[in-house]
Image: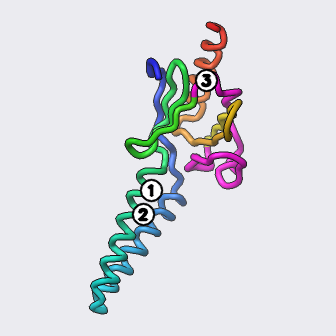
Amino acid sequence: MKHLIYEDTARYDFWLKILLGGILGLTLVLGIASLLWQDMEAALIMFGVTLFDALLFKAILPQRFQIFEDGVRIVLGEPFAINIPFSNIRYVKPASGRKTFVYWGQRFATSSRGVVEIARKKGLNLVISPSHDDLFLEQANYALESLACSN
């Protein structure tokens, strides 16, 4: 990737925060309850599940969306990222909030507001939810057009 043009954080809806926190909280509470029943092995397993789930959520949920001169990068938990060169992007446009839940492609949308669709020439399309979707769309389409004009 070349020079960074724009960077935005992922937007997370309240319901998703409650769902993820509930999953972690449930396994943690079950681990503490296992300690009360003197079942140390079950408690350690539940604490391990809680830690594993927290690390998994950190690794696979989008953190930032970056626009470079030659493509878009979806930054997940370190060191994971998805790089999409502009040469493989057909268009970047706003999408319906329903695509957060039902979409034939890769869903990295963590909010039903401000959903952006990235259609690829090869591979599955993606939906994302940047915090400032209008600005992200403006910058992505400007970079996509600039690259098309220079070729």
Q: Earlier in the sequence, mark 3 or mark 1?
A: 1
Give the residue pinned by disc 2: 53
Identify the residue at image location x=70%, y=27%: 90
Tally of numbered discs: 3
Identify the residue at image location x=62%, y=19%: 144
Callout 2–callout 1 Cβ contact below 8 Å: yes
Image location (x, y in percent) of residue 145: 65, 15
Image location (x, y in percent) of residue 81: 47, 39
Give the residue pinned by disc 3: 86
In the image, residue 104 lies in the stretch drawn in magenta: yes
| SS label for mark 1 | helix
Give the residue pinned by disc 1: 57
Instruction: Report which quarter residue 25 is drawn in.
Output: bottom left
Q: Alpha-carbon distance for marks 3 and 1?
A: 28 Å
Q: Alpha-carbon distance for marks 2 and 3?
A: 33 Å
> What number is the disc on residue 49?
none
**Range covered by the magenta-colored residues:** 85-113
| SS label for mark 3 | helix
Q: Earlier in the sequence, mark 2 or mark 3?
A: 2
| SS label for mark 2 | helix
Image location (x, y in percent) of residue 42: 34, 83
Callout 3–callout 1 Cβ contact below 8 Å: no
55 left or right of 1 in image: left
Q: Is residue 137 above or below residue 116?
A: above
- Residue kind at label 2, given as amino acid type: Asp
122 or 86, which is in the foreground?
A: 122
- Residue kind at label 1, given as amino acid type: Phe
